[in-house]
Amino acid sequence: MLEIKLGINKFYNICEWCMKMILLNLLWLAFSLGGLIIFGFFPATVAMFAVTRMWVQKTEQINFFKAFISTFKKEFWKANLIGLILFLTTTALYLDLLFIQSFEGGLAFYSFCLIIMVCLFCFVIALFLLALYVHMELPFLQYFKQSILIFLSYPLDTIIMIGSVLLLAFFFLVFPGLILFMAGSLISLIVTINAHRTFRKLSIRTIEY
C-alpha cells in the first residue's frame, strides 16, 4: 500500500512538473508574440530564465506567473538592448557566411568551418549571458565580458552546455509535437542548471526578484 502511495505521489509530481513547464513555455510564447517578437522575445526570454533560476534554487512559495510578469516589466528595455547587440552580432556572422560563398577551394571550406565555430561559440556565450543576467548583478557591459570569460575559463562546463543543448535539439527532432509546449522552457531549465553549477564557482552577488 505504501509503495502504491509513493508511486502515485511520484506520478503526481511528474505531472505537476510537466504542467509548470508547459505553462511557462506558453507564457514565453504569449509575451514574445505580445511584443510583436521584435520587442517581446528577449524580455520574455529573460523572464523565463528568471523563473527557471528560481526553480533551480528551490525558491519557496514561488508564484512563477507573478515572477514572470514582474521580470518582463522590470527588464524590458535592458533585455531589448541585449537583444539588439545579439541581433547585430548574428547579422554580422550571417553576412560573413554570405561573403565566404564567393571563396573557392580550400579557403572556402576552412573559412566556412571557422565561421560555424564562431557561431557556435557565440551561441553558447549568449546562453551563459542570459543565465548570468538573472543570476548576478553587474554593470551592463560586464555581462558580456563575464560571459566570454566564463566561456573561456570553464571549457568543460562549456562542452557540457553544448552537449546538453544538442541532446535537447535531438529530443525535439524525435518528438516535434512537444516543441510548441516545452521547447523554450525545457532549454531554459537545462541551460540554467548547467550555468548555475558554473556560477557556484564564482563569488558575485546574486539578484533577488
Image (spheres, rainbow, N blue to C red):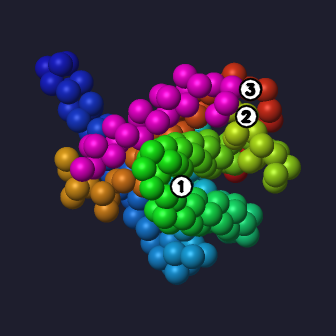
Left or right, 131 with reference to 172: right
Front-most of residues 174 and 63: 174
Front-most of residues 194 and 34: 194
Residue 158 on the magenta segment: yes
Q: Residues within 10 Å of mark 3 (few under 14, many from 20)?
A: few
Q: Cα distance, mark 3 to mark 2?
A: 12 Å
- Residue at disc 1, secondary structure: helix
Q: Residues within 10 Å of mark 1 (few under 14, many from 20)?
A: many
Q: From this view, report whether residue 34 is shown above or below residue 105.
A: below
Callout in the foreground (3, 1):
3
Determine the residue positioned at 57% across, 76% down.
38
Determine the residue positioned at 19% across, 18% down.
2
Where is mark 1, residue-wise? 48
Residue 106, can we see it? Answer: yes
The three-letter code of the residue at mark 2 reads Leu
Q: Give how far across and how far down residue 66 sits, in percent.
A: 58, 60
Q: Give how far across and how far down residue 41 sits, in percent.
A: 54, 68
